[in-house]
Image (cartoon, rainbow, N blue to C red):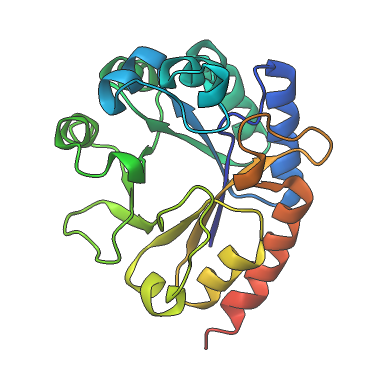
Amino acid sequence: MRIIAELSNAHNGDLALAHRLVDACADAGATHFKTQAYTPAELVALRGDGPAPEPWGAQGWTMRSLYEQAQTPLKWLPELSQHAKDRGMVWFSSVFGIGSLAFLEAIDCPIYKLAAIDFGRRGLRAEVESTGKPVIRSVPSTHRPQGSAQVFYCPPGYPQNDLHGLRQIVGRFDGFSYHGTDPFVPALAIAYGVDAVECHVQLDDVPSKLEANVCLTASQLADLVRWSTVARSCRG
């Protein structure tokens, strides 16, 4: 069973805070620690620019400025990945561009993740698959695509507020990617048949400035780890 803790931008631009998150996730019992590797230019090329969603758009933010605020600097990744490995977790990363992929290859990233919002971007997927490394794809569809990648179900929404039919859907997939604040939801996904869940995580005392509404706290992650062990044992 894999419990994947996603750093995302809960570091709030502070490397020391990112290291605290590594320790908090390890202490909570996460088996994997995932980062995001991109430059703002890569995400703009992949997803476009324009006004950011509310509440940032009303404050004059563009998607580019939001990406700049949210980015985990690539130069942090060697240090954070080693810290995660020293704490007994498997580190890997999502990737969003060719330059970042080359950087991750240089530091020997063992697994790559492709985000659900970029589902269908065949050019990026082909480059990632050409590395020969294991690939995890998050998909927003209830139908599992064909292919050799591991596939995680990632319902639409940020946060995910409509999880109707989860019991009938998740068993078709290898994992469940959750964007929300209730640790019971990913625990249910394990009870319903998946062997991996991925959740964004923030510290209990320092919430994410941008994504507190889609993050579990470290304490909730510990609850998820405990509940998931029970959930898996109840699958029969």
Q: Is residue 166 above or below residue 183?
A: below
In the picture, measured across the screen, residue 77 lies left or right of residue 16, that is left
State the image coordinates of residue 225 (x, y, percent, origin top left).
Answer: 68, 61
Q: Is residue 116 left or right of residue 22?
A: left
Residue sitting at the far right: 205
Where does residue 219 sit, x and y in percent of width and height? Answer: 79, 51
Total tally of numbered discs in the picture: 0
Instruction: Tell me what residue is drawn at x 37 percent, y 62 percent.
Output: 174
Residue that sits furthest to the front in the current view: 58
Q: Nearer the viewer, residue 75 or 9?
A: 9
| Residue 167 locus on image (x, y percent) | 45, 78
Percent x, y of residue 103: 37, 15
Instruction: Please name whichever residue, 224 or 59, is drawn nearer the observer in this view of the structure.
Output: 59
Relative to 197, residue 134 above or below? above
Q: Is residue 196 visible?
A: yes
- Quarter residue 127 falls in: top left
| Residue at point 66%, 26% (across, down) | 11
The answer to whether residue 107 is visible is no
Residue drawn at x 58%, y 31% is: 55
